Amino acid sequence: MESFMTAKIRAVGAKRSGKGLGRTGLLAAGGALVLMATAACGSGSAGAQNDFRPVKQTDGTLTVWVDSSRLAAAKLYQKEHPSVKMDIVTYDGDANGSNYLRTKVSLFDRTRHGWPDVVFSTQNNETSWAVQAGFTAPLDKGLIPKSTLAGWAKGANDPCTVNGTLYCLRNDLAQTVLWYNAPLMKKWGYQVPTTWEQYEALGKKVASEHPGYLVGSAGDVFTPEIYLWAAKCGANHITGPKAVTVDTGSATCKRMATLLDNLIEKKALSLSSVFSSDFDKNAADKILMMPGPSWYGGSLFEGSFKTPAHRIAVAPMPQWAGDSHPSVGDVGGGTWLLSAHSAHLKAATAFLTWATTSDDYQGKQAPGYPAYAPAARTWLAHKASSGYYAGDITRPLRTAADQVWTGWGYGQFSQEAIWAATVTPGLTAGKSIVSMLPAWENAIANYARTDGYKVSR
């Protein structure tokens, strides 16, 4: 058989990013190609994609759009499937909410050609526009078996589910845990906190006994996703199609905001971004604890900070005392979408399934914690055997994967942009987070209304 090893790889509008398939899947992908999708509402959708009818299916080149971090996945798939002719396109992955994909899809809709077959996005909210636009195909109506879809972590595909229909697949998770310096905690005789009350008390103690050392950072735009999401602050509750409830004045919001203010005042929390040269130079070696997502281990501690091996350990995210329903936040991840315009659904579905479930990529090469649970087990085993971490990282990360609080939604508007515009300048000016909660709520409401959301408060 003729081989198509010479896959084309090209870049379109690329910017620097901010951050094998089972036979069952192949057979299912070749089955019932005339699928019916229900009206699109649900988490963040603004419209409907009714009566999905695939275009005429043909053989031909499979066009796949990926960001630079997922380029390895597309290349590996091509290597393992040399008979598949592919056009691999790199783009910014919609990093930092660039909306590049949406802009290009709008252009393709007008010209009636150019749509990619499969797209990776760093954003979890693409369904908020892609379903209404008729761009993304329903995956659970005959394309991917239910037995395969059952393998995703609890709630992982919630951002992809619109009115009960699945329109994308979650690539990786960014569940929050508590990273800490194990030798330093032991040396100073401190216990790893299990509650937020203990965390705050220890932060104040560290500020007094070891000034300059940190128990976290509040200097990034995803601070609310680490702390306030985990605390069940109802600032971003997507309740339906273009509907959101915003309440930053709740007790849960105020309690976490007060905790952050208290630790900022004691200088136990940094106000510098963990990605800044200032933090790298002055604070990276002063971290005692750091609540943050699953990717902090490889990206920050091992990568940016060059923290020596056998120091960094993982513990569960602290919880409020007496709360019997543990909750964590989420800082990132990404999604794969299959185009409803694809004339190569069988090949596209095969690639999509492989890219999200394959041990060869997700388990052994993927930079982030796989959303597909069986691949996550392989990924965790690989990380645990690296010899870098102190103690067990498997149980805390695996447990947190099923504890992401569902009350924080995936709207079309960017919470990170809102925080950056509303809260970050105030923090820099010395204002407390508690004092800025009303302004934050107003800003969320205004951004949401601009994007066509009905806001309840």
Image (tube, grey):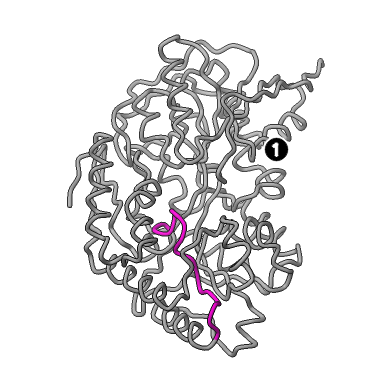
Residue at the extreme left of the image, as rendered: 457
**Segment colored magenta:** 210-225
Indicate whether 129 appears above or below 52: below
Magenta highlight on residue 330: no
Q: Nearer the viewer, residue 228 or 398?
A: 228
User: What amino acid is at disc 1?
Assistant: Ala
Looking at the image, residue 311 sits to the left or right of residue 236; the answer is: right
Q: Quadrant of residue 93?
A: top right
Side (left or right) of 16 relative to 273: right
* Residue at x 68%, y 73% (from the top left corner): 311
Q: Determine the image quadrant of residue 34.
A: top left
Spot occupied by residue 74 in the image (x, y as percentages of width and height): 67, 32
Q: Position of residue 1 (x, y in %)?
A: 82, 16
> Residue at the location (34% across, 27% down)?
132
| Nearest to the observer: residue 427 or residue 397 | 427
On screen, residue 245 versus residue 389, left or right, reads left
The chief SS type of the magenta part is: loop
Q: Nearer the viewer, residue 147 or 11?
A: 11
Is the residue marked by circle 1 packed among few (<14), some (14-19), or many (20+) residues within 10 Å?
some
Per the image, the residue denoted by label 1 is 72
Image point (55%, 48%), residue name? 172
The x and y percentages for residue 229 are 37, 60
Find residue 134 and report its horizontal and vertical position in percent. Answer: 38, 23
| Label 1 secondary element | helix
Quadrant assignment, res 133: top left
Q: Is residue 193 above or below residue 344?
A: below
Residue 153 in view: yes
